[in-house]
Image (cartoon, rainbow, N blue to C red):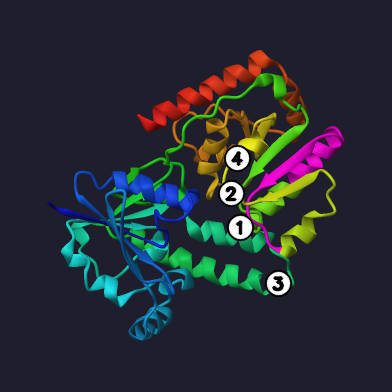
Amino acid sequence: MSKGLIVSTSSIEDEERGAILRVKRLLEELEPYDKNLFVIKFFKKGKKRKSGVQIEYFPLKLHDLPKMLIHFLKGAPLSNLLYSRKDITKRLDEFDKIIFHLSRTYQEPYPESKTSIDICESMSENFLMRYKLSNHLSWKRYFYYFESRRLEKFEKKISSIEGLQKFFITEKDQLFLKNTNCEVIPNKIYRDIVKKNDERINFYKCIFLGHVDYEPNIVSIIKTSKMLGKIDKSYELHVVGRFNLRSKQRLEKFKNIYLHGFVEFFDDIFSDALCGLSLVENTTGMQNKVLDYFTNSLPAIVSKQVQEGLPDKSPAMVLFKEELLENYLLELRKPQVRDKIIDKGYNYLLGLNS
């Protein structure tokens, strides 16, 4: 049988969130090939087979360091050169179809005619936004700017390679418009839909799902908290996602924010919530979060940017103006309105998974 390969920094052995769900989506693109997954790590090594996929881990080795230095001098982004592995490039010719998951796993040289890269979204724009949102006194701010400039050049280089197929989550990404040989592969959800008991709804409980330490997310959390506080002091924003001590200290002064951290199952937190909120200005990583809202029977209220990053016509409520939020929340208290949106969410997910 012909052999297909995904090169990623994420393994299907990891918890099923974000990047891992994307890897599962890309594995579907390898049909009917024999499925292989090369996972780039700093220390972990070994082989394992899971769910019909042969997984192999590639740690950093001494012979990778000269290649990393050469790439750095040539202007490669740090997020790419750190994952450069000589042992992977030596084996690419073994495979009949290859997909690099995210630009950071891109390896040279590669067999061009059978290779694709899952760009997903523009990372240079992502790092530039993180630069703009970072504290002026933080060293991270300057790293983000430095990396965004290198990523911009790197993405232009990839865009210019006509024989290299590129995958995106949405056709509205700025890189999609600049590339030839592109294909849109939207994300899917891989969990059973959770039905909700309307009688338990807490009209003042809202959810934000996402990694708290990620700058666009924490800025959105603070902004959303203030918006809810202006409407009614009784509103609560329950935040589900990993956070460090610094982020916790930054959010502690907002009395309507409840930090839950990472949770394995959403049921206990989501079951009585009114809605899920995603009023983020950058769409990176937000697709799966909004799909999680729909899967857990939560109507989603999203920013225009997040809506544009979702596949097809999402049934999320789009907040074009801040002053509309109060009306949206009041509308969602009506069972017939909420149930109609939830049903649209179910049908939307079924369409993505068909």
The residue identified by callout 1 is: 129
Q: Amino acid at mark 2?
A: Asn
**Does residue 248 show up?**
yes
Verify whether residue 126 appears in magenta.
no
The residue identified by callout 4 is: 266
Dot 3 falls on a residue whose secondary structure is: loop
Residues tagged 2 and 4 counted as in contact (Cβ below 8 A): no
Residues tagged 2 and 3 counted as in contact (Cβ below 8 A): no
Instruction: Give the number of the mark in front: 3 or 1.
Output: 3
Dot 2 falls on a residue whose secondary structure is: loop
The residue identified by callout 3 is: 138
Residue 179 appears left or right of 173: left
Which portion, as a residue range, is magenta? 223-244
Q: Nearer the viewer, residue 161 or 106?
A: 106
Verify whether residue 236 appears in magenta.
yes
Residues tagged 1 and 2 counted as in contact (Cβ below 8 A): yes
Q: Amino acid at mark 3?
A: Ser
How packed is label 2: few (under 14 Cα within 10 Å), some, or many (20 or more)? some
Between the residue at mark 4 and the residue at mark 1, the CA separation in whole angstroms equals 29 Å
Q: Amino acid at mark 4?
A: Phe
Instruction: Give the number of the mark in front: 2 or 4.
Output: 4
Residue 31 appears left or right of 120: left
How packed is label 3: few (under 14 Cα within 10 Å), some, or many (20 or more)? few
